[in-house]
Amino acid sequence: MIRLYVDAPLAAGTAIEATEGQAHYLGGVMRRAVGDSVHLFNGREGEWLGRIAHLSRGKATLAAENLVRPQSGDADLWLMFAVLKRDTTDLVVQKATELGVATLLPVFTERTNAGRVNLDRLRAIAIEAAEQSERLTIPEFRPARQLHDGLADWPADRALFVALERVDAQPLTPGSGPAGLLIGPEGGFGPRDHMALDRCRFVRPVSLGPRILRAETAAIVGLALLQAPG
Ligand code: SAM
């Protein structure tokens, strides 16, 4: 079953204009035709069975029919991550979406090599991952900023588990209450990053084991550990 995220209200009988990309995907890639069914979700009103009401080159209209899955919430889990090389950042966003992260906060650290972040592109990756993983929501993206600015705005009542390699930190275990995970860049955190982190009372240094993981591996492992059933 094809699942599509739509940025429109969903109710029985609603007609929704698909994006050009969705129309191409339905007709050109998946070879669907008028009358074929699709599932639709908008992040707020659950998942709906719908049908293709109109399909032509670059255009499609979808008609919502009935609710098949009520809206449910995600874990209240945030991921702050040092911006990585483009493909690796894409991978982190895809996996974080699959793993249910509610809010993604890209940051520039002392040793970050990347210069800018294309949030539209990352959001498109997150939408595709949500469609594929049967998630009902799209994670929220915060604009990329310097680590110390991100820390300055971090809510005091939300624990921030900071993954630190080569230190004698507690192993990461499932948290209770609002939480976030911070993963460093390819080269690890620098001295100024560590000084900024040391000043924050909500920071909890954690280890992900004895081996040095690539940042993208560390993000996946950390998110899985934080949500492991008790
Ligand atoms: N260049 C660093 C070094 O060789 O010491 C390694 C940095 S690692 C590739 C990238 C990020 O993954 C780190 O900043 C940290 O957040 C996380 N990480 C990797 N392995 C980890 C481990 N065993 N425990 C905790 N965090 C880890």
Image (spheres, grey):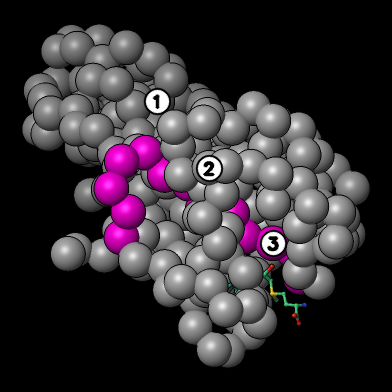
- Residue 148 - label: none
Point out the frontmost of discs 1 and 3. Answer: 3
* Secondary structure at numbered mark 2: loop
Is ligand 1 closer than 8 angstroms to the Cβ of mark 3? yes
In which image quadrant can residue 53 be found?
Answer: top left
Q: Point out the image quarter for the C terminus.
A: bottom left
Sequence-wise, which precedes: disc 1 or disc 3?
1
Amino acid type, mark 2: Phe
**Marks 3/2: CA–CA distance:** 17 Å
Residue density around tag 3, few if under 14, some if 14–19, many if 20 or more, within 10 Å: many
| Closest to the observer, 83 or 71 | 83
Whether residue 84 is visible, yes or no, is no
Q: Which residue is drawn at 85% across and 43% down?
A: 116
- Residue 202 - label: 2
Ligand 1 location (quadrant): bottom right
* Secondary structure at numbered mark 1: loop
Measured as percent of width and height from the top left, residue 201 is found at 57, 42
User: Mark 3 = which residue?
Assistant: 184
Point out the frontmost of discs 3 and 2. Answer: 2
Q: Which residue is drawn at 55% across and 62% down?
A: 205
Q: Is residue 198 above or below residue 66?
A: below
Relative placement, left or right, of 8 versus 156 is left
| Closest to the observer, 7 or 20 | 7
Q: For the magenta stretch, what is the residue range? A: 174-186
In which image quadrant can residue 102 be found?
Answer: top left
Measured as percent of width and height from the top left, residue 52 is found at 29, 29
Sequence-wise, which precedes: disc 3 or disc 2?
3
Sequence-wise, which precedes: disc 2 or disc 1?
1
Amino acid type, mark 1: Val
- Residue 6 - label: 1
